[in-house]
Image (tube, coloured by chain):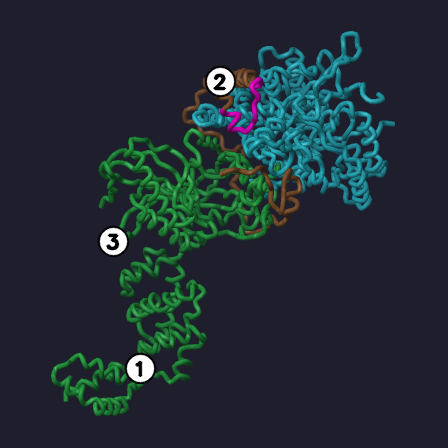
Amino acid sequence: MSVDKRTVTKIADLARIAVGPDELEPLVGELNNILNWIEQLSEVDTDGVAPMTSVVEVDLPWRADKVTDGGYRDEVLANAPGSEHGFFTVPKVIE
Amino acid sequence: MAKYIQGATGDWEVVIGLEIHAQVSSEAKLFSGSSTKFGSEPNTQVSFVCSAMPGMLPVINEECIRQAVRTGLAMGCKINLRSVFDRKNYFYADLPQGYQISQFKDPIVGEGVITVELEDGSTKDIGVERLHLEQDAGKSMHDQHPSQTYVDLNRSGVALMEIVSMPDMRSAEEAGAYFRKIRTLVRYAGTCDGNMDQGSMRADVNVSVRRPGAELGIRSETKNVNSIRFMMQVIEFETRRQIDILEDGGEVDQETRQFDPATGTTSSLRSKEEAHDYRYFPDPDLLPLEFSQAFVDELAKGLPELPDAKKSRLINDLGVSEYNAGVLVAEKENADYFEDLLGELTQKTGKDKDKLATQAANWVIVDLFGALKKAGKSITESPVSIQHAAELLSLQVDGTISGRIAKDVFEIMLKTGSSPEQIVEEKGLKQVSDTGAIEAMIDEILDSNQGKVEQYRAGKDKLFGFFVGQVMKKTQGKANPQVVNQLLRPKLDG
Amino acid sequence: MTKLTELTLAEARDGMVKGDFTSRELTEQYLSNMEQGRELNSYIVETADIALNMADKADQMIRGGNATGMTGIPIAVKDLYCTKDVHSASASHILNGFKPKYESTVTANLWQDGAVMLGKTNMDEFAMGSSNETSYYGPVKNPWRATKENGTLETKDYVPGGSSGGSVAAVAGDLAVAATGTDTGGSIRQPAAFTGLVGMKPTYGRCSRWGMIAFASSLDQAGPITKTVRDAAIMMESMASYDVKDSTSVERTVPNYEHALTGDIRGMKIGIPKEYRMDGMPSAIEKLWQQGIAWMKAAGAEIIDISLPHTKYALPTYYIVAPAEASSNLARYDGVKYGLRVEGDSLDGMYKNTRAEGFGHEVKRRILIGTYVLSAGYYDAYYLKAQKIRTLIAQDFAKAYEKVDVILTPTAPSAAFAMGEKSDDPIAMYLNDIFTVPASLAGLPAISVPAGLSQDAMPLGLHLIGRAFDEETILRAAQVLEHAAGFTAKPKVWWGDK
């Protein structure tokens, strides 16, 4: 399988990464190189093989339903590029 | 019974499916230890996990697992002993991780069937496809600043149960009955407070129309509808809109829409072409969620009696009318009040429950609900305690006061909060059953109404009521009506 | 007298406990070396004030008789660990200015034991790279330079390997006694091999990932980078812990790893996988591997030929799984909560501009690959397929461990290469991790030990892979290799005042 400019534009959009017109062509080439190399996996017979879910053989730990965290707004907002009145701020979303 | 909608070109059938999001009742969030309390200052219930700081990891809240299983059991659905948390990837201002932890391929709860009752007394089975656990997003506020959107992450990470129905509903009424039933069930199970005002329950409404018997039509999905009334409006509006499009020879777009409560209409949010590609994959920060059947059985044992079982017990064992039973079980608090009252009343009077249930049910539904409605209060805020209510009813049962007087006593109870026994005592409202006293009064009344006595004896039977009324008036309603009847008739009949 | 900064971690520990010198003296010498060594670009941030403060506290601990193995030991911390109120950016521009308000579990464990933080080390951006050339803060220079035929040192720069390039350069250049690294596909072991150091990746789940800036969650593990195997054992014990904040952390007692270093591997079964004999592998590597086998045999180990049939698929599998997880893990860098924001004409515009400017080219490439392999219609063919092959790779190892106790391979297919040599060819770069990636995919512990030099006198490493949670056996075997190899070479100082 290989990707074209349209596909790369689409995935860049899904990933929210602006790609300039001059960057697109080289990216298509680079991604296809990698995808072609990955393609060798198709020769492996994986019928009836369960996909790996975790390399550790342990049970998912459960925590008690207790309030043990939060309540430190200043620290949560400390690194925010934009904040006002205790909120994070972002460019206005028009709905 | 098919319910078709008549269009200009023939009959149409509407097909509805619901995705109900119910907030799990828990102290802390699904994957972090922050509080779930409603209405706090912005971003005060936010941890480094909820705000997706680099290197933060999710750890699951065991109560949320229990609540999802309880809900699944209450809905009679299959419980999956192994389920998987997936990441649903998309960007939005109030989604700090850039993905929502949800369950995609392997949800915690599988299929089941919900039976709903419709206004005409018929029932309908509606399939439940699944219930899965997922994180809520934060809240964006677009109207606080001219150029900025404000983001509050207090809700970010709160546990939600998404309950997905099969496309089995065929009218707004059915959808409403289904939503109400789910709400009743989660409230009985104690897994969601069902509080729609605070957004604890909301629905994505899928609507399509088709010619009767035809293939499923293209559907629209209206997001985040937060009341049953609105949901029914959405269905009505979408049905009309889609039929109009199809009858004009157009095609319905598969799209996501939003509801405007002010106009009762929906409008397009995004089309299928702009639809998200969520790139689900199992969350590598979490292992599969696994538990034993014994864990499920233990939770099943802890569940309270559910509305369907309760209703049939009220009808079959206690002799409550079907209508009254339906009203009482619809809200768990009402049913609880009724049952507690009945228990108390049984103790006080020494009579069996089934002898008292009808009277108690009538009193709760007519007198108490009426008073609560007038006062704008819920049953949990009832100004009349179970104790007092039982006292009031038992005064009636043992003949101390009449039903008429009981209503007056109840009025006074509402105003003063005093106990009915005290009121009856202080105001001297005890029913008069002393035959001698009543007989004397009857004689007096017959004497001073000779003309009416003549008319009665001449065949005007209806006047019997007049004489009863006179006696009651004279005793300020305290005369035992049965005794009055017994004494009055032989005297009038001469 | 040996300079204090040439001591191993164990020697420094013993010297401080005996009272030969203080942590403050040791720390001051390192701070001075760091100043001299800035040309290496191994540190992004030097934290001298914090270091001296911690050193004084450590000296108190030592005086009070409360010293642990790490007390007073000046170490460098990879920039990927969140350290409270200190630059923590995974060497990415997108985390511009980010100073977390929390401390990672692994570093908190180290500070609890009295270790001293010298600064945050450079690395490949988000740990994506094998040469430390993708950092926003510029490439790291390997303290080692090849020796020309005429016996003089090359003047060009060599890469230190990656992604923990700053950490290894700091330790190899005597700018830290030891350093924390992280290993996703070889990011501790390959750079350790490139710089003549010991680098260990423990079993997945042995160290908490809480507070480590995620690259690929199912693969990322913390581990030590040290001068000797004993040092690795001491540091490993401090870093490892069960953490209730990490759902993939494993509840197991942390053993005293130093006790495992008995020097006795008689009867130990060493597996030699035939699939690791790659075409075009430099003869020096093949020779070193054979030498390693001979050393183990001489020490009384039994050598057993084994097969790990899916080895060749490990690398492409890794390049599906890791980018897929990364594409999701890196979605949180959106200009809203922390780090860089580049304004745009809308919320989406802001996202796109921020991420275009904030991420470097290699990171973007991997995000795009990861996004693609997870997207509708491709998930089964790529991601699901890769996770199935991952199961087969883990099964290969499980089968091998029915017959052997450890597996011996080379660490990397070459010695450190010159800067810029492979930066235009992603796949050539990815091939650096060909021997380290399989253990990562299976979650197994592995260690690289310096074992010899290439023809042009650049360090080479041998690699031991163990059973899950059997760090003790690979440490014991590694120390035997280390002693047999007698690797004592150090880079000739060409930087600073010399």
Element at label 2: loop
Residue underneath mark 2: A4
Q: The chain coloured green carries which letter?
A: B
Label 2 chain ID: A
Percent of width and height locating residue B17: 35, 41
The structure residue drawn at horizontal position 77% and vertical position 42%, both measured from the top left corner, is C67
| Res B120 label | 3
Q: In this rendering, does residue C269 appear at all?
A: no
Q: Say if the magenta span includes residue A13.
A: yes
Residue underneath mark 1: B477
N-terminal-most mark, 1 or 3: 3
Percent of width and height locating residue B464: 19, 81
Using residue A51 as the reference point, say whether residue B402 is left or right of it.
left
Q: The chain coloured cyan carries which letter?
A: C
Position above or below: A10 against B139: above
> For this rendering, which residue is in front, B311 or C249?
B311
Residue furthest out toward the top: C150
Position above or below: C57 against A16: below
Percent of width and height locating residue B305: 37, 57
| Res C100 label | none
Using residue B98 as the reference point, say whether residue C121 is left or right of it.
right
Element at label 3: loop
Q: Say if the magenta span includes residue C374.
A: no
Q: Quadrant of the C terminus of chain C?
A: top right
Percent of width and height locating residue B207: 34, 40
Label 1 chain ID: B
